[in-house]
Amino acid sequence: MDETVVKSLYTPNCQQDAINLLSKVAVNLPGMIFQVLQQQDGSVLVLYISSGCEYLYELEPETIHKDFRVLYKLIHPQDIKAFTESITYCTTNNTSWHWEGRIITPSGKLKWIQASSQPELQESGDLLWNGLVMDITDRKQAEEKLLESEARYQAILDAIPDLMFRISRDSEYLDLKSEGANITLSREEIVGKHVHELLPSDVAAISLEAIAKTLDSGTLQTCEYQLPTPLGVKDYEARLVVSGQDEVVAIVRDITERKQAEVALQNLAQKFAKAFSCSPDSITISTLQEGRFIEVNDSFVKLSGYERDEAIGKTSFDLNLWVHDRDRQNLLQELQATGVVRNLEFEFRQKSGKIITTLLSAEIIDLDGLPSILAVHHDITERKQVEAQLHLSAERDRLLAETLVRIRSSLNLEEVLQTTVTEVRQFLQTDRVFICLNNTKLGARTLAESVAPKYPSVTGWSTNDEAYLQELRNLLKNNLVRVIEDVTQVALSPKVKAHFQKFQTKAALSVPIMLGNELFGALIANQCSGPRHWQPIEIDLLQQMSEQVAIAIHQSQIYQKLAELNTNLEHQVQERTAQLQQKMQEVEELHRVKDVVLHTVAHDLRTSVMGNLMVLKNLLNQGVGSGGAGEQGSKGAGEQESKGAGEQGSRGKITASLSPLPPIPSAPLPLSHAQSPIPVSRSIIERMIQGNDRQLTMINSLLEINSCEKQGIDIKPEPVDFNTLLGATFTQLEPILRQNQATLKNLVLADLPLVMADATRLEKVLAHLITYSLQNNPPGLNFILSASVEGKMIRTQIQDDGVIMSKLECDRLFDLHVRDPQDCCSTSIGLKTYLCRKVIKAHGGEIGVISNRKRGLTFWFTLPLAISPTNRP
């Protein structure tokens, strides 16, 4: 701002106007451009962040891209509420968003920012925010300093001095009023004294002159002077009026602060004059009615292209700045209605004729009684271009995404191609888009087309001219894009020129459609209305769309092949299905035969084994009571047999007579042989009984396994006292434990909760586990039984000090598989352990075995509690 203009603003009568004028000048620095997509589910997607965020927020664009909410964390706590309310108001009322507030950067700097955006509702329901954030810290600081200056100046204006003197013509103090005044002398020290006695000589001379002028002229006289005080030199103003015959009243005011404020204001004027001239934004002062420029800064010269002397004194219409004349009328109406406008978007014409877009902020000011407009123009031309480019990119991405979805969801190639050319023509805003096929047998022909009604269609066009086709192929050789902005400026063959003339083509953009390394065809855009400059984004779109079209064509070809394969496959499946059904019937028949054989063989084996057991036990019982039989026998031979039997019994032998047994179908023997007793060792009969017992157990286990595999284990769980169950089991096991010289130590606590179990089946599980250890270890085995509550289960452990097993044997112990045939008892025991696991699983528990490091095994299993341990009474 010109120094002369600044000084003219600070005349004594318009000091307040000057402050108001200077307070409107703010430096709007370039900031950060952003584009954010607010999706319907509440999530936020950052589409674009300019590099200005590094200066403004001290954050890299990548950081903001990852999480846009990092910007919210930088907002000053006192400004978060206003920020949230502004966003809510904007989204609720569908208005543009403007907000000013403070942020605290990661380095601890406090900044003022100004953010604005115009949200756009997308077809999908999402909200697209395109906006700008600027650093207005300098402006805010300037405003704060100006407000402080205004406060000091207002204090000076409001401070009415109350020190009053009555002074005679000969300068004697007649009276004074000093309440509230900062005066070091008392009333008695002043009244009756003369001016030259209390004031310095120079001040006294000024006072005497003012008193004389006041009395002689009868008018108000004012004089200023300085006095030294204990607080330093002070400035005072004395106003003198005639108060009587040869006396005046002097009202003395301390104007030290006002003097200091005036100096500060002059400094401030110079400072803001520099801000006016150095601001990066265009600042102008013009008349309200005509729009005649009074003052412009250097940024206006740079922005408009007009020199300062070309602009001052001219109106905006004289310079032809307004692109739309009605815009200034709209601006005046808004200013007259509200007195101020903020960030209104207008288009202006530069001296060169180029159109630019600015954000205009303006306010009506009074400049020496002349209504004027103080306007700040912020150039957003580049931002608008970026926004347009972003919008175009978004449309391109949308079109590509929809095309990709269409290709994936539809197998109708004709529909896909037609929709593609229609949407590409709409995006490019061109006159014709079509897809042409290149085929060595069929020649060239059009597959799909979208054309403006007033231009000829290429649908149905085809050619078999191989020379012409080869020329067209050469135009797209090496997968290159063919760009023709003006057909008259490109060297073409007569055939191609004739083709362009026939279909009124003035500009063309051709992109090859490649299937692998083969040229399938081309995606072509024509401009028929005149030459056209094809933008890079348009060329890129056509290239990507050609790739999508290639995918659709390839997909269609694959689908045709799949259809043929599916036809053959259906016949094969039908044949295989028939074969499988036949095999399943055969398998079912085999299972039926297996069940019949199993039950038949098991029935016969059980009958045979049980018969053997009855005979052997009968023999064993007769051997035990053979003494009695000898006494009841006949004399002679009978007595010798009885005696022999007794002697043999004492030696572990039994003399068996075959006469009590059922007749055996065999060849008849002589009577002497049939009646002869057969000596049999007692241990042999006991072994035969044990073997038959094991066979019977194995047969029963096989039948039980077969039943549970088909129908499952049938259990009837009910609440059972675990200690009672263990006691009954130990009672049954007592004989076998005593027979094997084994001991069992019960460490189970008496207050265990009830378990849900089938007592009968659980007793068998315990018996099988202990029997396994007894049969696989020598006599003298020691058992330790313990149980504990784990969550909602009871875990029971049976530990012995016998032989150990490998981990593989532990893992396979409860599986159903064929064991070592040399182990005479392994098969039946294996079946029992398999059934044990079935029973525990049916209860909802688990079972396993752990081989201890040094000696012995630990069997464990879990059972569910009848009630939760936390709810026990």
Image (tube, rainbow, N blue to C red):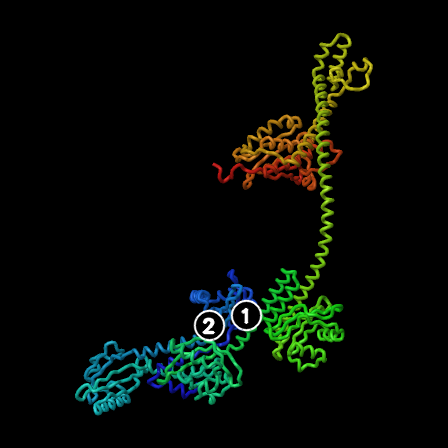
- Where residue 714 appears, x then y in whole percent? 61, 34
Rendered view: 603 above or below 172: above
Is residue 693 visible from the viewing direction of this image? yes
- Where residue 358 appears, x then y in whole percent? 49, 78
> Which SS class for mark 1?
strand
Say which residue label 1 marks: 49
Rendered view: 43 above or below 310: above
**Which amino acid, mark 1?**
Ile
- Where residue 445 appears, x then y in whole percent? 70, 70
- Foreground residue among 774 and 312: 312
Residue 498 numbered mark, or none: none
Q: Quadrant of residue 408?
A: bottom right
- Foreground residue among 361 and 292: 292
Rendered view: 94 above or below 234: above
Name the residue rendered at 74%, 12% in the picture. Answer: 642
Say which residue label 2 marks: 114
Rendered view: 415 above or below 355: above
> Which SS class for mark 2?
strand
- Where residue 780 appears, x then y in whole percent? 66, 30
Q: Is residue 761 left or right of residue 612?
A: left
Name the residue rendered at 73%, 23% in the picture. Answer: 683
Q: Is residue 347 left or right of residue 154?
A: right
